[in-house]
Image: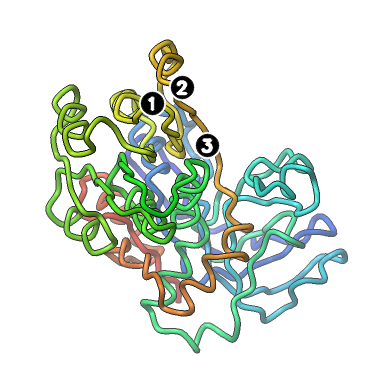
């Protein structure tokens, strides 16, 4: 089978490797139908995160059909159409029961990787996999795109809104105009925010942010951005959703909340140190981490997609085959695509 690897900084390659097999009783083998490139994959592609040559790709979002199940799997069976979340919660530990399956206490191997491949071995599949009604042929390509976002970016955007306790009538700022930031706008609207401020400098992303529910946009950066947001919010937002992880984005997020605001962080932090003094005097709350993908999909998001309430699949603006994996990464790296969609034969 074909599988993508990092050849070196800025360079992907495909290799022919053996198809994965069941290794543990709670394994599930999935034939991948759709996958994608995540903004977090670009940290490796750009060389910001050190990655060894010929390393497995960090891709972690998949939509597919179950091929084989381990002896302990009773929730899915061969032929089932499933969303494969990037997290592998157990569903019964204290963290999972509290709705934080992205930090499952039962598994040390709680995250997917290497799913930019024709087949994957999904570990701990008993609870973590999300079964989609019917078969792939029952769904349009647009619906498949939205279902694929439920493997990560839509759930991650929702996580930012949930941990920030976004509520009806709130004013919300969303840091980041990638797929997660755009999905966070959807989530803020779902939870009843009345004012949603996006922070994009790109016309296509601004337009999609507005379609998803943004009421305002701030395109400047640094101190100028802080002042613009404070002016728009009459002194600070009720909630700030940080969906990037860079030092500038984080600093802005921490600065633009009102006293008592909650900052929901889902951008993987790339800031080695953070001065928390100002937050202390503002009584600000900082929360966040890996998304509770399975929990949100099963409780809220799958139904919202199937009912047509939300359409997060619009974040996929270019499609590629697995053979075009290099172009898929380059399109996102060069901001020619918001998110690259991988279509498998």
Query: Where's the N terminus, which quadrant?
Result: bottom right
Residue 341, above or below 206: below
Residue ranking furthest to the right: 71
**Residue at screen point 22% across, 42% down:** 199
- Residue at 76%, 39% (x, y): give it: 105
Q: For the residues marked 2 and 1, what is the alpha-carbon distance in whole angstroms?
A: 6 Å
Q: Nearer the viewer, residue 312 or 185?
A: 185
The answer to whether residue 92 is left or right of residue 13 is: right
Dot 3: what SS?
strand
- Residue 339 at x, y percent in the picture: 32, 56
Instruction: Say which quarter of the image contains residue 323.
Output: bottom left
Q: Which mark is residue 288?
A: 3
Which tag, 2 or 3, sits closer to the chain's start? Answer: 2
Q: Quadrant of residue 134?
A: bottom right
Which residue ends up furthest to the bottom in the rendered image? 138
Residue placed under numbered mark 1 in the picture: 259
223, 143: nearer the viewer: 223
């Amino acid at each position: 089978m074909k599988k993508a690897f990092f050849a070196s900084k800025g360079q992907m390659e495909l290799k022919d490797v053996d198809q994965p097999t069941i290794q543990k009783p709670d394994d599930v083998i999935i034939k991948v139908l759709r996958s994608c490139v995540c903004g977090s994959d670009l940290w490796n592609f750009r060389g910001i995160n050190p990655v060894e040559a010929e390393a497995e790709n960090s891709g972690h979002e998949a939509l597919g059909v179950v091929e084989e199940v381990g002896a302990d799997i009773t929730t899915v069976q061969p032929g089932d159409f499933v969303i494969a979340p990037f997290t592998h919660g157990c569903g019964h530990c204290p963290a999972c029961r509290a709705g934080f399956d992205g930090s499952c206490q039962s598994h040390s191997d709680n995250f997917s990787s290497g799913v930019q491949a024709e087949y994957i071995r999904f570990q701990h599949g008993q609870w973590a996999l999300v079964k989609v009604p019917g078969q792939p042929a029952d769904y349009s390509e647009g619906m498949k795109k939205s279902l694929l976002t439920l493997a990560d970016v839509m759930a991650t955007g929702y996580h930012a809104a949930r941990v920030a306790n976004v509520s009806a009538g709130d004013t919300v700022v969303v840091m980041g105009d990638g797929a997660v930031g755009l999905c966070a706008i959807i989530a803020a609207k779902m939870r009843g925010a009345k004012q949603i401020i996006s922070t994009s400098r790109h016309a296509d992303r601004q337009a999609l942010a507005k379609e998803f529910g943004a009421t305002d946009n701030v395109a400047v950066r640094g101190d100028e951005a802080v002042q613009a947001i404070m002016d728009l919010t009459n002194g600070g937002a009720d909630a700030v959703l940080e969906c990037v992880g860079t030092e500038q984005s984080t600093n802005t997020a921490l600065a633009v909340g009102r006293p008592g605001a909650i900052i929901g962080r889902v951008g993987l932090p790339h800031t080695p140190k953070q001065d928390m003094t100002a937050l202390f005097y503002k009584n600000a709350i900082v929360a966040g981490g890996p998304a509770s993908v399975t929990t949100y999909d099963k409780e809220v998001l799958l139904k919202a997609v199937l009912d047509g309430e939300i359409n997060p699949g619009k974040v996929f603006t270019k499609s590629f085959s697995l053979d075009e994996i290099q172009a898929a990464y380059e399109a996102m790296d060069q901001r020619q695509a918001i998110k690259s969609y991988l279509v498998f034969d």
